[in-house]
């Protein structure tokens, strides 16, 4: 694919928490027709392409209030019949972290409002009203793989595990560091979990067991589980 014109579309997708699973909404998209170099590589700048008509203006994307993903679609023949797609979460860079410090209090307030909105939505969806108790459990991925979280750590009894519904599980992932930070980036493809009772060695284990596709990406990272205990 040397010195060849490609058809590309770059889309900004917003992550939305939902039951039974999150979904992604494209809010911005643009097209490019870059030419590969002598090594078969292309480079594009998001925000400089041809705007797809229904997109919101690039300057109106509120980067600090949502979780965003970048999707790229490619047509090897240079047109718009895209056959290769890839999606990746947009993460922080040093410059954006500087601005993040300036709006820390405002961001914390918005996060609290968002968490409350999730609780209201979940209760409405399941129709539980006030018959379900919603809790949030924070954890570190630690050294174990898979990670096992006991019922007692969740402040529950063994019998409670039959009445527990996991509403959301978010895990930090990225470059391995010795010091983890409080950041929850959502579930990456491949993370699964078991609920209630299962074998752990020679004994039954009551709680949650979380499996990571590549442990090194999640080592010593923060996570949180939003769960409801039915009354």
Image (cartoon, rainbow, N blue to C red):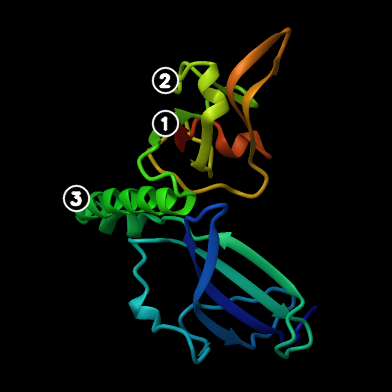
| Horizontal side, residue 75 vs residue 208: left or right | right
Q: Residue 105 carries which label?
A: 3
Residue depth check, mark 3 versus mark 1: number of the one nearer the observer: 1
Residue 149 placement (x, y as % from top left)? 54, 22
Residue 79's place in the image compared with 140, above or below, is below
Mark 2 falls on what kind of element? loop
**CA separation in Å, label 3 and label 1:** 22 Å
The answer to which image quadrant residue 216 occupies is top right
Circles 2, 1 touching at the beta carbon (< 8 Å): yes
Q: In which quarter of the image is the N terminus?
A: bottom right
Q: In the image, which is nearer the foreground, mark 2 or mark 1? A: 2
Q: In percent of the image, x 70 and y 78: which residue is there?
A: 74
Residue 149's label in the rendered image is: none
Residue 178 position, x and y percent, is: 46, 29
Residue at disc 3, secondary structure:
helix
Q: Is residue 60 left or right of residue 81?
A: left
Q: Is residue 185 visible?
A: yes
**What SS does tag 1 mark?**
strand
Q: How far apart are marks 2 and 1 (CA)?
A: 9 Å
Residue 171 is situated, as x and y percent measured from the top left of the image, at: 51, 41
**Residue 120 as seen in the image, left or right of residue 217:** left
In this view, the residue in front, 206 or 213, is: 206
Query: Label 2, on which residue?
Result: 155
- First in sequence, mark 3 or 2: give its number: 3
Residue topped by disc 1? 137
The tag earlier along the polypeptide, 2 or 1, is 1
Tell me where residue 208 appears, x and y as whole percent.
58, 27
Q: Nearer the viewer, mark 3 or mark 2?
A: 2
Tell me what residue is drawn at x 73 percent, y 81 percent. 82
């Amino acid at each position: 694919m040397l010195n060849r014109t490609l058809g590309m579309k770059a889309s900004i997708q917003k992550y939305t928490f939902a039951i039974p699973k999150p979904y992604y909404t494209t809010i911005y998209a643009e097209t490019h027709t870059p030419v590969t170099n002598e090594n078969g590589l292309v480079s594009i700048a998001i925000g400089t392409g041809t705007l797809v008509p229904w997109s919101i203006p690039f300057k109106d994307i509120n980067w600090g209030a949502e979780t965003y993903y970048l999707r790229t679609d490619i047509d090897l023949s240079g047109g718009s019949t895209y056959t290769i797609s890839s999606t990746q979460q947009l993460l922080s860079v040093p410059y954006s972290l500087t601005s993040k410090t300036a709006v820390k209090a405002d961001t914390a307030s918005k996060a609290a409002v968002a968490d409350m909105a999730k609780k209201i939505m979940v209760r409405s969806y399941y129709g539980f009203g006030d018959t379900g108790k919603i809790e949030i459990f924070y954890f570190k991925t630690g050294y174990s793989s898979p990670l096992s979280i006991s019922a007692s750590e969740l402040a529950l009894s063994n019998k409670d595990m039959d009445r527990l519904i996991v509403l959301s599980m978010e895990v930090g992932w990225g470059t391995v560091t010795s010091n983890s930070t409080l950041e929850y980036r959502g579930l990456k493809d491949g993370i699964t979990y078991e609920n209630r009772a299962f074998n752990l060695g020679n004994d039954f284990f009551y709680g949650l067991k979380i499996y990571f596709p590549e442990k090194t990406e999640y080592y010593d990272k923060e996570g949180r589980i939003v769960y409801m205990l039915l009354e």
